[in-house]
Image (cartoon, helix red, strand yellow):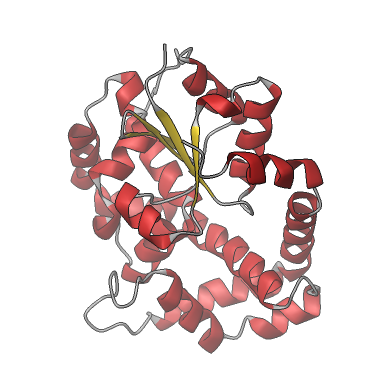
Amino acid sequence: MAGRVEIVIHPTCAASYEAVKALAAEGLLGEVVLHSAEDPRLVLRLGAWSVPWVLVDGRPAATDPVDPGEVVEIASGAWQRRVEDPVEAFMATVLHSAYAAAVAYLHGSLEPVIDEALASAAARSPLSGLDPAEVAAMVRRDAAGLYQEWEDRLMRALGVSFARETWWGLNGSMGREELRQAASPASVAAWLIAKASIGRGGLPPRPLPPRERVEKLAGFIRRAAAGLASKVRREQEAILGDEEYWRLLRENLGRG
């Protein structure tokens, strides 16, 4: 049987959306405690680096990338998967966390995100038995090489996040040209600083983003603007327009 399963979601997160819908389809939504990341106090208290953030008996047990079937397995106590490469799993988790990716990209280093809670979620530690401290140590041993290997992927993931938040900022009225205009290097640099910080927490001592990395990110957003705008529009319109999903959230968020 599963222990106490809690899940921190944000309503606009595609992985959260899919997890909630899958749990409802299997009749398991009432078996988990569903929290909303709209409450920053809860996010800080539960140490949620990303959403969905799944805890089993208070321990981080999964986060994005997580497919809805895996969330169902965790909720039902049927999880029997293997984590073949915990370092790869950790890096994929950083990639899928807009916050962790922004911190790493701003610093040009994985060091600020090598955290045992994040490692626990990435390695499914309460379920797999992998020691999060050992996973974190494995990442730290090759942190510089891993950052260099993954930097381009981190940059592209941040481009999607920038596009999504620009879509929100423009109240859903954003096409290719609007996104291109928004993605000046100065605006992207300001966004990156804000994305990678909680107040000043998480900022480098001299929080001036390296020009080369900022221009690389801004250039990617401008080149890919048409595809990014279309992707974000489809994703967000599907979520925001699903009345059944919003009913499920009204009935289940904060219960338990």
Residue furthest out toward the bottom: 186
In the displayed structure, 224 sits above or below 28; it is below
Image quarter of the N terminus:
top left
> Residue at the spot x=29%, y=69% of the render?
202
192 or 10, nearer to the observer: 10
**Front-most of 169 and 21?**
21
Apparent side of residue 161 relative to residue 177 in the rendered image (left or right) = left
Residue at 60% from the left image edge and 86% from the top image edge: 184
* Percent position of residue 55, x then y: 38, 34
91, above or below 113, in the image: above
Q: Nearer the viewer, residue 211 or 50?
A: 50
Give the image location of residue 23, x and y in percent.
62, 27
x and y percent of residue 72 in the render?
A: 56, 23
Say which residue appears at 39% left-offset and 57% top-offset.
100
Q: Is residue 148 visible?
A: no
Instruction: Kindly indicate the quadrant of the structure image that contains residue 127.
Output: top left
Let me know if residue 145 appears in the view.
Answer: yes
- On screen, residue 169 versus residue 234, left or right, reads left
- What is the count of numbered marks? 0
Within the image, what quadrant is residue 205 found in?
A: bottom left
Question: Residue at the spot x=36%, y=40% of the render?
Answer: 90
Give coordinates of residue 147: x percent, y percent. 35, 55
